Amino acid sequence: TQLLEQSPQFLSIQEGENLTVYCNSSSVFSSLQWYRQEPGEGPVLLVTVVTGGEVKKLKRLTFQFGDARKDSSLHITAAQPGDTGLYLCAGDNAGNMLTFGGGTRLMVKP
Amino acid sequence: DTGVSQDPRHKITKRGQNVTFRCDPISEHNRLYWYRQTLGQGPEFLTYFQNEAQLEKSRLLSDRFSAERPKGSFSTLEIQRTEQGDSAMYLCASSLKFLSRGGEKLFFGSGTQLSVL
């Protein structure tokens, strides 16, 4: 059972559009990470958010951690075909392993 | 060091055969994780090592699965008597665990894609 629910599961948009993907849980996490994974490769860490309400920007990507540290969002501005991939959130509950969400598969069409 | 290395990249086997995968972590990393990922899903935790000690195993890891990390360096994951349901991508990740806050940063290998026929 996944403790982290990601939505939407699939997203297909045109180049230049904006989008937001969500990561929700009923559990509190000490930190939350976002990864991007391309077909046939392992996930690559994009960002870690730690403080409730924290916002981090990585070029056209904006990550937000919810005030209660139970949810997070990823907003992409002016999406490009190179943004295509599987976006995964993963929660760290200060235990010994990350719990991953099911992922949002993004396709950006030129 | 160029990152986490996994071997082989692909493995096709017949049901009932045993398979072994290898993971070479980033050299200074003390933690090593195994995850399994099926198509369209996020990675699921299998087990992890801190140095050579295996500290936690998921309920997903049946008796047919065994993992080792001798000398706290590379790790192997063996699956005995493979079943079709074992078909998945097996991912290895390593990290350098600090006691400070800020989350643990995992560096993943490219995975081993297992197909059980």
Image (spheres, coloured by chain):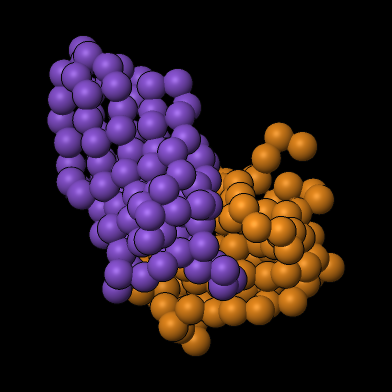
Chain colours: A purple, B orange
Q: Is the N terminus of chain A in the top left, top right, bottom left or bottom right quadrant?
A: bottom left
Q: Is the C terminus of chain A in the top left, top right, bottom left or bottom right quadrant?
A: top left
The residue shown at (73%, 47%) is B26
- Residue found at the very far bottom of the displayed protein: B63
Question: Viewed as shown, does residue B97 lie left or right of A27?
Answer: right
A20, B90: nearer the viewer? A20
The residue shown at (38%, 42%) is A64
A83 is higher (above) or lower (below) than B46: above
Question: Viewed as shown, does residue B74 lie left or right of B13?
Answer: right
Q: Position of residue A109 (x, y in %)?
A: 19, 19
Name the quadrant containing residue B82.
Answer: bottom left
Name the quadrant containing residue B36.
Answer: bottom left
**Image label count:** 0
Q: Position of residue B60 (x, y in %)?
A: 42, 78
Residue B99: in sight, yes or no?
yes
B105, B24: nearer the viewer? B105
The residue shown at (29%, 22%) is A77
Q: Position of residue B43 (x, y in %)?
A: 41, 58
Q: Position of residue B102 (x, y in %)?
A: 62, 53
B114 is higher (above) or lower (below) than B54: above
Name the quadrant containing residue B103.
Answer: bottom right
B51, B7: nearer the viewer? B51
Question: Viewed as shown, does residue A1 lie left or right of B53?
Answer: left
Residue B36: in sight, yes or no?
no
B106, B24: nearer the viewer? B106
The residue shown at (15%, 30%) is A12
